[in-house]
Structures are given as C-alpha cells and as structure tokens.
Amino acid sequence: MIATARRIDVKEAETLQAHYTLWDWRRRISDLYARIRAMSDAEVAAQLWRTTRAELFRNHPQTPLEAGASAPEYFDYNPRMRFTVEFAPTNDDAPYHLPVSDGTIHLSPFAETVGLRSALGNELTVYWIDGYGGGVFLPFLDATSGHATYPGGRYLLDTIKGADLGWTKDGRVILDFNFAYNPSCSYSSRWTCPLPPASNRLRARVEAGERA
C-alpha cells in the first residue's frame, strides 16, 4: 500500500506505483534465483523458474507482456546445456557501448568463459555494467537466434536483476542455458534492452531455455 503526507495528482500516483511495483518485481526475481541456488536438482529448479515466471508474466503489474499475449514458452530441459566454467581475463578490456533500442549502455568486458568451446564451439565474453553499483551481464546469440529463439539474443546472467545461478563449491561459475531468457523488449516496445555483440554468438544451436 502506498501512502503520502500530501495530496498527489494522478500522474504522481502512477509514477509512485510504477516504481513500487518494479521494486516488487525485481525482489521476486531475486528471491526466485536464491531459491534456485539452494536446490540440488537442476531440472526441478528449472521447472520452478518456469512456473514462477509464468505467474508473474500473467498477473504482475510489471509484466512485459502486452494484453492478451501468452506466457513464455521453453525448450524441454536439456541437461547437456548445463555447464560449470571458469572465468579468465579477457584480452579486450576496452569499454563497449552496447546498442539498446533507444540508445546505448556502457559495458566493460572483464572476463571470458573457459569451458564452453568443446561443446558449443566458442567461449563468451562476460561484461560488467558500468554505473552505480554495476553488475555482471552475459548476453548471447546462437544458431537458433532469429529462428527458434528471439533474433536479438537471450540473457544468461544479469546480476542487477538477480539473474545469477551461483558457483560450485570449487568456485566454478554455473552457466545453465536452460535458464536463458528473452529480454523484455522481445515482448513489447515499451521496454529497452541491450543487444548482444556479434562476438558473443555461439556456433552451436542452444536448444534450451526460452523460445521465440
């Protein structure tokens, strides 16, 4: 419930409500990933992720879906698309100005995955989002992009929004492409989103995670 000490007009009330509900959306997503990290069965965790997202997309005020649109659809869970990787320093540390649908967002490449090449054809660059607080961001494209999946690519890690599957006990990063998801701009032009660089295109078909 939102209360104020003075009378506010409709626009002020709508702005306040929008920020409140976005805060709630991000808290729920963060809580969801915390539950997932505590689960030992990855396939059961993926099912929880899907059902929780479906409920949020259907009923939450901050849903990216347009009225009447259906909830996200997914590939069947594929255990071969779950990896544990190391991060190595990247040779390219120049800031990257990543296009979004209404401008640019500033990212700094800080690492490269080690552990995907043999299965998926190449490694991925991991970015740090510049700005207050920062955050890890891992977007990618693959051979399904523009066909079975969204042409603008998908996201795997976005710690600003809580999308983080954690580490193994020996410190390797968990990258499970069954949790790959579409950016909000894939559902509605009301949203803007960073688009993955061509260098983060995997040669393989990643038939896991969210579909187009």
Image: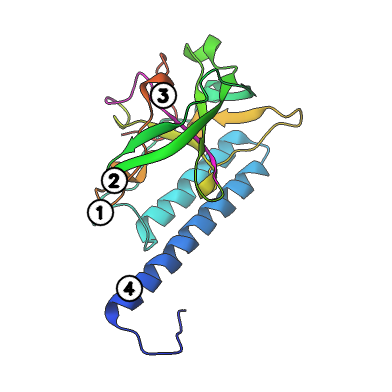
**Could you tell me if the residues under marks 3 and 2 are in contact, i.e. CB atoms within 8 Å?**
no
Q: Which marked residue is nearer to the observer: mark 2 or mark 4?
A: 4
**Could you tell me if the residues under marks 3 and 4 are in contact, i.e. CB atoms within 8 Å?**
no
Q: From the viewer's perspective, is residue 197 above or below residue 62?
A: above
Q: Which segment is the magenta one? A: 134-147
**Residue 174 counted in the magenta span:** no
Distance between mark 3 and mark 2 Cα atoms: 20 Å
In the rendered image, residue 4, in percent from the top left (x then y), is placed at 45, 85
Residue 180 at least partly seen: no
In the rendered image, residue 124, in percent from the top left (x then y), is placed at 50, 22
Name the N-terminal-most of marks 3 and 2.
2
How many numbered badges does the structure rendering display? 4
Q: Main secondary structure of the magenta part?
A: loop
Q: Which marked residue is nearer to the observer: mark 3 or mark 1?
A: 1
Q: Which mark is residue 66?
A: 1
Residue 64 at least partly seen: yes
Considering every residue shown, the one lying at the far right of the view is 170
Q: Which marked residue is nearer to the observer: mark 3 or mark 2?
A: 2
Say few, some or many: other residues with alpha carbon within 10 Å of mark 4 (under 14 / 14 to 19 / 20 or more).
few
> Which residue is depicted at the point 58% across and 54% down?
31
Q: Secondary structure at mark 3?
A: loop
Say few, some or many: other residues with alpha carbon within 10 Å of mark 1 (under 14 / 14 to 19 / 20 or more).
few
Name the N-terminal-most of marks 2 and 4.
4
Distance between mark 3 and mark 1 Cα atoms: 26 Å
Residue for badge 3: 207
Residue for badge 4: 14
